Amino acid sequence: MKLTFDLLPDTTWNNNIRNMMGVSEWDKLRKKVYKLYKLQCGICKTKRKLQCHEIWKFDDEDHTQTLTGFIALCELCHAIKHIGFAKIQSDRGDIDWEVLVKHYCTVNKCRKEFFKSDYQKALKMFERRSKYDWVVKIGDLKLSEI
């Protein structure tokens, strides 16, 4: 699957580089990432407005969440990566859930039933991971080299 869900455990919400770096440093980093991806979404290749997404690796045995990189994503791909938050926004009427489902299915060349199944699996993983306190690590990533 090209486009997957990245539901972070609720115990690590807001533990992100953007909050740790401050606005001006984050802006420099995200602009480097956009340039690295040639000003297009790293998944669907659109040139819609981009957002910088942190890529995390999870060790489910020692409950360690390690930052491994960044990717430039369009607003739709980014919303799907954070599908739990997107569902909350949809329930408030801030975004159109069906647009997200359609985008997921188009990018992944799959049917709506697969989206539903994949979404349910992601929610179960989220619930399982959210039972633990996670150690958040930056890893060996050198932010200045991005």
Image (cartoon, grey):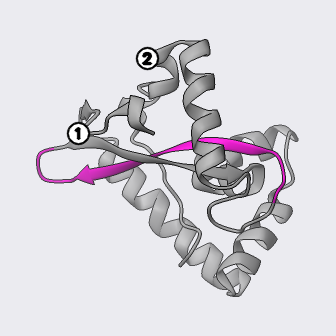
Q: Position of residue 104 (x, y in %)?
A: 70, 71
Q: Is residue 20 above or below residue 17?
A: above
Residue 101 in percent (x, y) is at 76, 68
Q: Which residues are magenta?
A: 47-62
**Residue 44 visible at all:** yes
Q: Is residue 60 above or below residue 16?
A: below
**Is residue 15 left or right of 66 when viewed as pictured?**
right
**Where does residue 47 sit, x and y in percent of width and height?**
82, 57
Q: Amino acid at mark 2?
A: Met
Q: Position of residue 45 (x, y in %)?
A: 73, 67
Q: In which quadrant will I find the C terminus? A: top left
Find residue 136 and report its image quarter: top left
Of the residues tagged 1 and 2, which is closer to the observer? 1
> Which is nearer the N-term, disc 1 or disc 2?
2
Residue beneath disc 2? 20
Q: Residue at x 57, y 74 (%)?
A: 2
Residue type (three-letter) at the residue carrying disc 1 = Asp
Q: Residue at x 76, y 40 (%)?
A: 89
Q: Does dot 2 land on a helix, a strand or a loop?
A: helix
Left or right: 37, with 125 as reference point: right
Q: Residue at x 41, y 60 (%)?
A: 124
Judge by depth and name the residue closer to the eye, 59 or 49: 49
Pick the residue in front: 76 or 142.
142
